Image: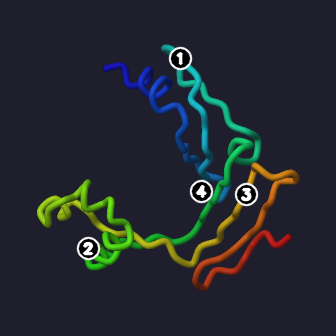
Amino acid sequence: MNYLKYLVEEIHTTVMATTDSNDLPITCAIDVMDYDDNGLYFLTAKGKDTMSCVAVSLRGKVKEIGSEPLERLFKKNSYMYEIYPTEQSRKALTVFCIYDANGEWFDLSKKPIERADFSIGNSKIINQQ
């Protein structure tokens, strides 16, 4: 299978992650445009996502909390019962929690772009406007 061709022609829009100058992860939505023997070519708007959607970015601590919350999460997201219909199939799942996080909200469909900062847990808002 040509995985790069599939990425370009079937998936096309995805999220890419790099690290900043402090080795913290940074993600961005990208449009994968082409590939060749030298690499994969993609586009993204400088700053954030495309101009027709809402983007939310979170940076914080993550911890694995195991399978205990699975039943609660499945009840809130009932389509998961179709994907993982048996207790045996759910054994492959584990739950993670992002906490003490900073977030950014961007509504790129509005003019001017709507932007807001928020926090979760004990984290303080960094980029107050």
The crowding category of the residue bearing disc 4, from other C-alpha atoms within 10 Å (few below 14, some 14 to 19, many at least 20), is few
Q: N-terminal of the two: label 1 or label 2?
A: 1
Residue for badge 1: 38
For the C terminus, the quadrant is bottom right
**What residue lies at 86% left-to-right and 51% top-to-bottom?**
111
**Label 4 vs label 2: CA separation?**
30 Å
Q: Is residue 11 left or right of residue 42?
A: left
The crowding category of the residue bearing disc 2, from other C-alpha atoms within 10 Å (few below 14, some 14 to 19, many at least 20), is some
Q: Which mark is residue 67?
A: 2
**Which numbered mark, 1 or 4, is in the foreground of this view?**
1
Give the percent coordinates (x, y) of residue 121. Answer: 58, 83
Q: Is residue 53 left or right of residue 88?
A: right
**Label 3 vs label 1: CA separation?**
34 Å
Q: Which mark is residue 106?
A: 3
Q: Nearer the viewer, residue 54 or 75?
A: 75
Cβ atoms under marks 3 and 1 closer than 8 Å:
no
Give the percent coordinates (x, y) of residue 57. Answer: 63, 59
Give the percent coordinates (x, y) of residue 61. Answer: 51, 72
Q: Amino acid at mark 3?
A: Phe
Q: Amino acid at mark 2?
A: Ser
Cβ atoms under marks 3 and 4 closer than 8 Å:
no
Q: Amino acid at mark 4?
A: Asp
Element class at badge 1: loop
Q: N-terminal of the two: label 2 or label 3?
A: 2
Q: Is residue 9 left or right of residue 101?
A: left
**What residue lies at 45% left-to-right and 28% top-to-bottom?**
10
**Which numbered mark, 1 or 2, is in the foreground of this view?**
2
Q: N-terminal of the two: label 1 or label 4?
A: 4
Q: N-terminal of the two: label 3 or label 4?
A: 4
**Which numbered mark, 3 or 4, is in the foreground of this view?**
3
Quadrant in which residue 73 is drawn: bottom left
